[in-house]
Image (spheres, rainbow, N blue to C red):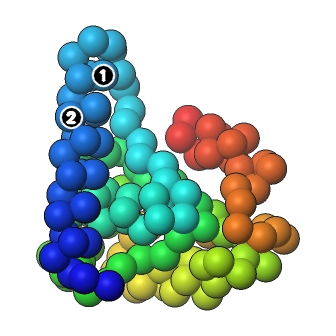
């Protein structure tokens, strides 16, 4: 994996999501802003949310993992009050369930108190019950 290509792609994605968030906030009265990503979107979501905790009320990471080498202890400390749901299928063969478990452990040890791990029997997908869980958590 070319780190320069990854960095450029992430910066473009970061700009797009940030611009979209700003646009929506300028047009509508929005009380909360949550970031949700599936698979690679979850990997990117962790980075974007944890590096910019003032921009998001929470993160829902489905079927992805935490890229630890781009996050610092300062990032974790600044974001530790963020609400985070990690949802992952125990039979996922694309991104192993251990990625979710590892992310949960890292965030828990970093002091995140609003952290939930939703494991379900399933493959690389979003749990059928996930959206109800997400909506209940957001409220």
Circle 1 residue: 24
> How far from the left and from the top, in percent, is residue 90?
76, 78
Inspect this view and state whether residue 44 appears. Answer: yes
Q: Classify residue 114 as left or right of residue 10.
A: right
- Picture quadrant of residue 99: bottom right
Instruction: Note whether 89 is above or below 25 in the view shown.
Output: below
Which residue was labeled with disc 2?
A: 19
Q: Residues within 10 Å of mark 2 (few under 14, many from 20)?
A: few
Observer-nearest residue: 131 or 93?
Answer: 93
Q: CA distance from mark 1 to mark 2?
A: 9 Å
Q: Quadrant of the C terminus?
A: top right
Q: Residues within 10 Å of mark 1 (few under 14, many from 20)?
A: few
- Compared to 54, does 80 lie above or below? below
Residue 117 lies left or right of residue 37; in this view the side is: right
Q: Position of residue 78 (x, y in %)?
A: 19, 65
- Sequence-wise first label, 1 or 2: 2
* Residue 38 left/right relative to 71: right
């Amino acid at each position: 994996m070319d780190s320069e290509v990854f960095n450029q792609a992430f910066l473009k994605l970061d700009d797009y999501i940030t611009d979209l968030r700003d646009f929506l906030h300028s047009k509508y009265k929005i009380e909360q802003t949550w970031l949700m990503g599936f698979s690679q979107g979850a990997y990117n979501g962790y980075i974007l949310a944890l590096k910019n905790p003032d921009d998001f009320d929470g993160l829902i990471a489905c079927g992805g993992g935490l890229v630890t080498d781009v996050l610092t202890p300062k990032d974790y400390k600044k974001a530790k009050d963020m609400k985070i749901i990690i949802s992952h299928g125990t039979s996922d063969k694309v991104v192993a369930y251990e990625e979710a478990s590892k992310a949960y452990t890292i965030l828990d040890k970093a002091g995140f108190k609003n952290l939930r791990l939703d494991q379900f029997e399933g493959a690389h997908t979003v749990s059928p019950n996930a959206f109800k869980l997400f909506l209940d958590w957001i409220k």
